[in-house]
Amino acid sequence: MAVYQYTARDQMGRVVTGTLEAENDAQVAEKLHQMGFFITAIERAKAGPGEARSFFDLFRGISLRDLALMSRQFSTMVNSGLTLVRSLTILEQQTTSHRLREVLSKVRADVEQGRTLAEALSKHPQAFSSLYVNMVRAGEAGGVLDDVLQRLATFLEKEFALRQKIKSAMVYPVILTLAATGALLFMTMVIIPQFVVFFQELNVGDLPVPTKIVMAISYVLRTFWYVWIPGIAVAVWGFLRWLRTPVGKAWWDRTKLHLPVFGSVIQKTVLARFARTLGTLLGAGVPLLQSFDVTSKAVDNVVVEEAIRKVRASIREGESIALPLSQVELFPPMVVQMVKVGEEAGNLDEMLVKVADFYDTEVEAAVAALASTLEPAMIVFMGLVVGAMVVSLYLPIFQLAAKAG
């Protein structure tokens, strides 16, 4: 709970000031409306010692969660009759994101100078995507900014929830991989050299081939660590740099969609983002061709972007949406049929949102199944690798025992 200072007028027109405890300014506005007050100003009281911002907040970026919360609060304030400048001032004061606070301060200054909200937001693409800006522009033009901000908040919340579910499902496999890799390195760098000394003391003759291979690997890793560690680092750095180039990004985006296990999950994720973005834009009143243009950039996949642009070109020539979609292999028949029904019924935006919800559910189920499949597969794989190393180390001992017998 935070403390908010407010200035309002009662039903007799008298100025009333005071403080209220609430989770956010929207709750303050609701309480004041219930009390019969007309709000003129709401601001959060200055933080006390216990509310001081963490040093690490200075380096935290603007997350989808921050934007979603800000959008929902912004919508509530606009709906309550607060001006844009006053709403932005309140948002600037209460946000916990240092970066977002700086951006909102600049946006507020631009709005005060007479720019539209969309124009002010478009100057900060690192915080507000083209989707966000275009929807706000449509909301301002149609006089439904509060509704558009609510749609944006819902969109961002769903996007954030989907990403969190994917991340949480992959946490255990990643930890397991790191632990197994650490165990293998420990065996290679510490345990195997002890066996080398042991075999030398026993004066073992010709070692089995598997044992020689394991010891050779251990020797190379221990002796030439100054070569392979920087080599791996440079290779990873170079590969990541190449992926940022147009050619590298196109190759990676195409490869992701055809990966043996992860490809279907990535494709469903892209389809969910496509449907939700396009549906949200159309529902906010953004023109069809402009919606497709924004959506092509929002999917963040070069291959899908090219497919959407082809569909957009066909629509511009007068074709329906469903027909060019059906000619692109990326879009399954279910998506095409839902779009066709939506076009005929005049509720395309609602149909697209339903498609997005369907694929969100599909992604959640696929990720859960993938995680449950990866865990035992990785355990078995690492068990086989560790087991092979152990057996290769004990083979000379078995040979000595056989000779002694």
Image: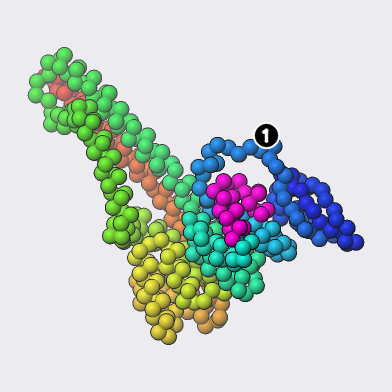
Q: Residue at x 62, y 58 (%)?
A: 108
Q: Residue at x 39, y 38 (%)?
A: 176
Query: Within the magenta stretch, is there residue 29?
Result: no
Which colour style is shown?
A: rainbow
The residue labelled by disc 1 is 49
**Is 372 in front, or is 227?**
227
Q: Secondary structure at mark 1?
A: helix
* Residue 33 located left or right of residue 249: right
Is residue 299 something that shows in the picture? yes
**Is 341 in front, or is 48?**
48
Dot 1 surroundings within 10 Å: few (below 14), some, or many (20 or more)? few
Location of the N terminus by quadrant is top right
Report x, y in % for residue 279.
Answer: 52, 70
Q: Residue at x 52, y 83 (%)?
A: 344
Report x, y in % for residue 91.
Answer: 65, 53
**Is 78 in front, or is 277?**
78
> Start and end of the magenta stretch?
89-110
